[in-house]
Image (cartoon, helix red, strand yellow):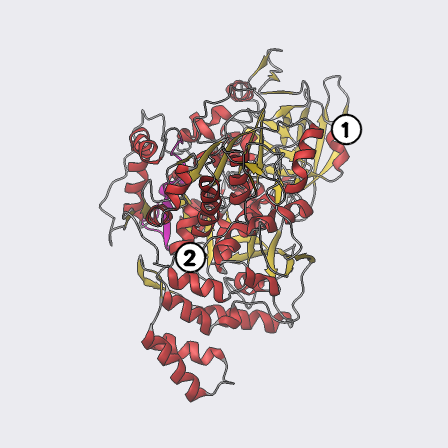
């Protein structure tokens, strides 16, 4: 590091302080390349290529660029020829790397195996974090998961070894924390098979959540398509202090933009307030940007990121980024499509929920709001951690409150759980005493995994259907998401507010103003939380949980037992017949919110993520049927009887009846899970017609040969009845920008025709015609 910095200084003296940074960076790169990570010593950071592409695009557009534009356009496959219009054109991009969590990696690797390619074309990793159920405590839960999921872990490890993919074993931590600690760096473009991949934006990256088929494209070396994002600017002024935390920034933004306000846009934070937020705090804000539908979120490179890189053993990357800082901040005078301004000095602690992450309340108001709405005031469980809030700083601030309570003889009134984000975080908070404080106040430290945040929680303190309140530092709080209980009122907030509520045991407690009572009767207030941004003694890496892929895995085998109920090799979907889709039966007309949790539930279903036929037994079981306001109860139009959604779909498929789903606004919001697109295709679905789609789900449907269509007139949703048949016409002349028609055939013999919009481009139409994107990839290999 000293040699590197000395070289920089000498070059600046030789070139003059006014010389372009390009010359310094170019000279340094000629002298010594810097690896993307310690795990991939032969894959190098290429700021020169990023700079070259940015220069080409800036000259073409003849205007200043936002930071997100620099990084996105800097990864264009053809910067000189690519048409670039925000919100309209599709960009062909070359991401630097791919990351996959174990639940989605199964299907992604099965698809990659089907592609017939020998090895991934870009650095890629698999992270085992989704299949560990929280039940007793970290060590016991991890051991049980290793036993229960042995077949899946062996498949992922062997597939990783054969195809050149790094493998992070169970217990290593949550994918997004591992990426931040090891792989993220300013200016990188990474795609990940999880909707909270944008977490990496806290380190100046463009990290985008995608489905497995998109990951396969990038791993195959094919340019990846993304609709050119709009850019929402969030200008931060002032500084965070007291009880206000980075989480409150995104809770406030979610309240402003709602769950679909960021759709089709990158959220770019800027302004003088940025420097008051830690690197991991910035990651928290970017992580939960997924809940507003944003493509991703990003912060500009600053000294906080530089310090974090140095503290996580990446000093060379920090120095190189510092020399190329002009690439990693927005141009002066750049244009945002929308601007939101937040004064951090005036921002108050927030809590959002229940049942949706955009229902924002100041913490000071939540007690009275809950009382007014009949929400349970008693906090049954407080849960801190998850990929959103499990940094060293988060744990330290929570531990500072635990110590205050313990010093007064108090423990948590509510149950309290702690989820470390990584093995490195777990080992470091154990060493530094934070874990002990959190245990002593009543907490249970869970495994380094997703756990309750994604429904991997064997909760036993309340019965299903019993109304109760939980408060978490997670990112998402849809109905039944955490514990499969639709009556659980889940609220999301910062770890410090969760800890305060767990100690007090009620939503009626405002930690900024209210007093607690010690066992001796003494009244006292909690002082605002404090915590070091990074450990003074460096991080303790803990156990080594990484498996390097061998240099050559060609001779290795990946076995999938044909009798397995966890894994199933994929069969290609059928090609389009060349005709219009006639008489599609309406399977279900969905009422209201329909997230990917409603379409393909997680929790206990995660075990089947590698077996398409078995996972399809959860298709739309959480969606509300407009006909009877019931879930998983629809009319079978062949028998006249009511049955579960997957059962009726299977019956239709068996009788060669294709079907369609009709839905409401922001259909498919939430997770990146492509199972929500694979399942309807597998069970005979051909189209999904809704008022609007969430970005990732719409793309996933296209990838699997489905038709995601939207009403030209949203009021036409009301014209469709649950027992209708729909013909989609105009497919023989299917073209970008040209609407299709739907002929709605009612059971009384009448019919009406409506117009349907789509966002297919020419390549995506080829996916539909071939039956799927994977089918089209194979066609192009011939």
Q: Nearer the viewer, residue 603 or 715?
A: 603
Q: Residue at x 60, y 55 (%)?
A: 267
Q: Nearer the viewer, residue 614 or 284?
A: 284
Q: What element carries label 1?
A: strand
The vertical placement of 590 against 306, above or below, is: above
Q: Which mark is residue 752?
A: 1
Q: What stretch is highlighted in magenta?
A: 111-134
**Circle 1 residues within 10 Å: few <14, some 14–19, many ≥20:** few
Where does label 2 land, which residue?
Answer: 534
Whether residue 592 is visible = yes
Residue 65, x across and y down, in percent: 61, 67
The vertical placement of 495 against 330, above or below, is: above
Q: Which of 473 and 498 is in front in this view?
A: 498
Residue 325, x across and y down, in percent: 50, 71
**Circle 2 residues within 10 Å: few <14, some 14–19, many ≥20:** some
Q: Quadrant of the N terminus?
A: bottom left
Whether residue 362 is visible = no
């Amino acid at each position: 590091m000293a040699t590197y910095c000395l070289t920089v200084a000498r070059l600046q003296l030789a070139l003059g302080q006014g010389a372009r940074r390009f010359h310094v960076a170019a000279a340094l790169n000629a002298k010594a390349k810097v690896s993307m990570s310690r795990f991939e010593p032969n894959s190098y950071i290429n700021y020169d290529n990023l700079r070259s592409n940015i220069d080409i695009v800036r000259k073409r557009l003849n205007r200043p660029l936002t930071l997100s534009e620099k990084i996105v356009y800097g990864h264009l496959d053809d910067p000189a020829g690519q048409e670039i219009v925000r919100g309209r054109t599709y960009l062909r991009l070359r991401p630097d790397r791919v990351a996959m969590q174990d639940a989605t990696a199964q299907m992604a690797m099965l698809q990659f195996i089907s592609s017939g390619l020998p090895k991934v074309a870009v650095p890629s990793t698999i992270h085992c974090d989704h299949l560990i159920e929280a039940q007793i405590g970290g060590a016991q839960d991890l051991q049980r998961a290793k036993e229960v999921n042995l077949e899946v872990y062996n498949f992922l490890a062997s597939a990783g070894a054969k195809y050149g993919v790094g493998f992070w074993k169970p217990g290593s931590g949550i994918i997004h924390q591992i990426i931040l600690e090891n792989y993220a760096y300013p200016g990188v473009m990474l795609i990940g098979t999880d909707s909270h991949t944008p977490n990496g934006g806290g380190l100046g990256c463009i990290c985008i959540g995608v489905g497995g088929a998109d990951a396969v494209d990038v791993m195959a070396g094919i340019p990846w398509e993304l609709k050119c994002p709009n850019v929402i600017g969030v200008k931060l002024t002032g500084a965070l202090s007291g009880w206000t935390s980075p989480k409150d920034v995104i809770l406030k933004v979610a309240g402003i933009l709602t769950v679909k306000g960021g759709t089709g846009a990158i959220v770019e934070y800027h302004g003088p307030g940025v420097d008051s937020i830690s690197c991991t705090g910035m990651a928290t804000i970017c992580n939960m940007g997924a809940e507003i539908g944003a493509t991703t979120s990003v912060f500009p490179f600053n000294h906080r990121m530089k310090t974090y890189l140095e503290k996580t053993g990446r000093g060379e990357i920090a120095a190189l980024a510092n020399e190329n800082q002009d690439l990693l901040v927005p141009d002066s005078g750049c244009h945002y499509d929308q601007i939101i301004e937040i004064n951090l000095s005036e921002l108050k602690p927030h809590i959002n929920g229940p049942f949706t992450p955009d229902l924002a309340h100041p913490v000071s108001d939540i007690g009275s709001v809950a009382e007014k709405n009949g929400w349970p005031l008693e906090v049954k469980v407080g849960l801190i951690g998850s990929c959103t809030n499990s940094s060293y700083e988060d744990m330290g601030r929570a531990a500072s409150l635990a110590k205050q309570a313990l010093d007064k003889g108090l423990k948590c009134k509510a149950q309290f759980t702690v989820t470390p984000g990584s093995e490195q975080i777990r080992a470091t908070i154990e060493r530094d005493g934070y874990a002990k404080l959190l245990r002593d106040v009543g907490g249970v430290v869970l495994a380094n995994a997703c756990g309750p945040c994604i429904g991997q929680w064997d909760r036993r303190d309340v019965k299903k259907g019993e109304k109760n309140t939980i408060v978490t530092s997670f990112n998402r709080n849809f109905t039944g998401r955490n514990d499969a209980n639709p009556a659980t009122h889940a609220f999301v907030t910062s770890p410090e507010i969760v800890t305060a509520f767990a100690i007090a045991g009620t939503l009626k407690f405002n930690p900024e103003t209210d007093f607690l009572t010690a066992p001796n009767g003494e009244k006292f207030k909690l002082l605002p939380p404090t915590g070091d941004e990074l450990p003074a003694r460096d991080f303790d890496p803990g156990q080594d949980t990484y498996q390097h892929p061998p240099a050559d895995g060609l001779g290795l085998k990946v076995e999938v037992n044909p009798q397995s109920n966890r894994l199933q090799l994929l069969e290609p979907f059928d090609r389009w017949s060349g005709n219009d889709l006639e008489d599609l039966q309406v399977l279900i007309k969905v009422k209201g919110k329909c997230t990917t949790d409603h379409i393909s539930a997680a929790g206990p279903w995660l075990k089947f993520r590698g077996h398409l036929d078995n996972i399809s037994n959860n298709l739309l079981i959480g969606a509300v049927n407009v006909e009877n306001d019931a879930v998983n109860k629809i009319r079978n139009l062949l028998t006249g009887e009511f049955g579960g959604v997957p059962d009726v779909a299977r019956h239709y498929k068996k009788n060669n009846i294709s079907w369609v789903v009709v839905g409401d606004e922001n259909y498919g919001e939430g997770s990146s899970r492509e199972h929500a697109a694979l399942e309807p295709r597998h069970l005979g679905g051909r189209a999904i017609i809704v008022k609007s789609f969430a970005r990732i789900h719409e793309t996933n449907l296209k990838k699997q040969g489905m038709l995601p269509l939207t009403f030209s007139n949203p009021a036409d949703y009301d014209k469709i009845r649950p027992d209708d048949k729909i013909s989609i016409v105009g497919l023989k002349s299917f073209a970008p920008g040209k609407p299709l028609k739907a002929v709605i055939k009612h059971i009384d013999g009448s019919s009406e025709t409506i117009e349907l919009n789509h966002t297919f481009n020419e390549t995506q139409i080829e996916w539909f015609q071939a039956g799927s994107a994977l089918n089209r990839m194979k066609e192009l290999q011939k």
